[in-house]
Image (cartoon, helix red, strand yellow):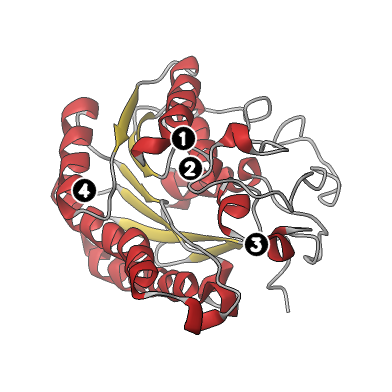
Amino acid sequence: MADQTTQTDPTEQHDQPEGTDDQIVHPGLTRDMTDEPDHGEDSYRGSDRLTGKRAVITGGDSGIGRAVALAFAREGADVLISYLPEEEEDGAETARLVEEAGRKAVRFPGDIRDEEVCRSLIDTAVSELGGIDVLVNNAAYQMAQLGGIADITTEQFDRVLKTNLYAMFWLCKLALPHLRPGSVIINSSSVQGTSPSPELLDYATTKAGIINFTKGLALELADKGIRVNTVAPGPIWTPLIPATMPEERSEGHGESTPLGRAGQPAEVAPAYVFFASQESSYVTGEVLTMAGGAQAS
């Protein structure tokens, strides 16, 4: 991918990743992947669309979160990224990319399934960045179960809901007193929210909840001048895939889409930039699906 402006056949923008049938240990580090994702390191070119903004990105260590952090930094934003402590290696690399772009990077390792960790995250963002203009709720947990509901334990169900829904709820609530008119909340949902796969029943349930939460909160905050939107990715190549999907589901990831391949985090990040920027000033409560045409029919 030369850059995000050169006209290219989208079926050839990226090669299908190698090693889609490999398995790595959850939560999955980027270096453990046979074919590392493209986060825009060599392709994303900023144009001062987020100059002076202060952004919080959960799950900002790798995958879509890293690509968003990199894009935000190259657009002029300072960034706090949160991630699990065991993902420190990836978190440090994302921070390096942000700083390489000339912006401030704040690392916040912690498990956001704990409300007090979420409180500390927001407090840290306010103290270290001087405030919050953009909140990106991107962190997620999934673990495919081929046996469907019978194989989903209460422990797993609780972990999925706490990571994907509770944390988003807590962070929005805690950040709200710090958000001024013009601030933005961006939630990461998924095509699973409208087209659930049986092996991801619990995950899909939370993604549907994120979509509904986004729409409801957008209505509530509209008169306060705060916009709320969600990006719904499809088969994007991130560490989450080989770390949570069995071989028979991850093999050929994305090949069944009309575009015939998995998407890359670098292809998704511009949607977050759009929602975070003033260019989307008349957009709130919307779902932007990025799935290679998988939901075109």
Image quarter hosting the C terminus? bottom right
Label 3 is placed on what type of residue? Pro
Q: Which mark is residue 118?
A: 4
**Upstream in the sequence, badge 4 or badge 3?**
4
Q: Which mark is residue 65?
A: 2
Left or right: 45 as drawn, with respect to 153 = right
Label 4 is placed on what type of residue? Cys
Callout 4: SS: helix
- Report, in whole angstroms, how far the alpha carbon at label 4 lies from the one at label 1: 19 Å
Q: Residue at the location (80% across, 66% down)? A: 256
Instruction: Give the crowd class for mark 4: few <14, some 14-19, many >=20 residues within 10 Å.
Output: many
Left or right: 204 as drawn, with respect to 212 = right
Q: Position of residue 145 (x, y in %)?
A: 55, 72
Question: CB of mark 2 within 8 Å of CB of mark 1?
Answer: yes
Q: Position of residue 264 (x, y in %)?
A: 67, 45
Left or right: 181 as drawn, with respect to 253 = left
Question: CB of mark 2 within 8 Å of CB of mark 3?
Answer: no
Instruction: Give the crowd class for mark 2: few <14, some 14-19, many >=20 residues within 10 Å.
Output: many
**Upstream in the sequence, badge 4 or badge 2?**
2
Q: Which mark is residue 69?
A: 1
Image quarter hosting the N terminus? top right
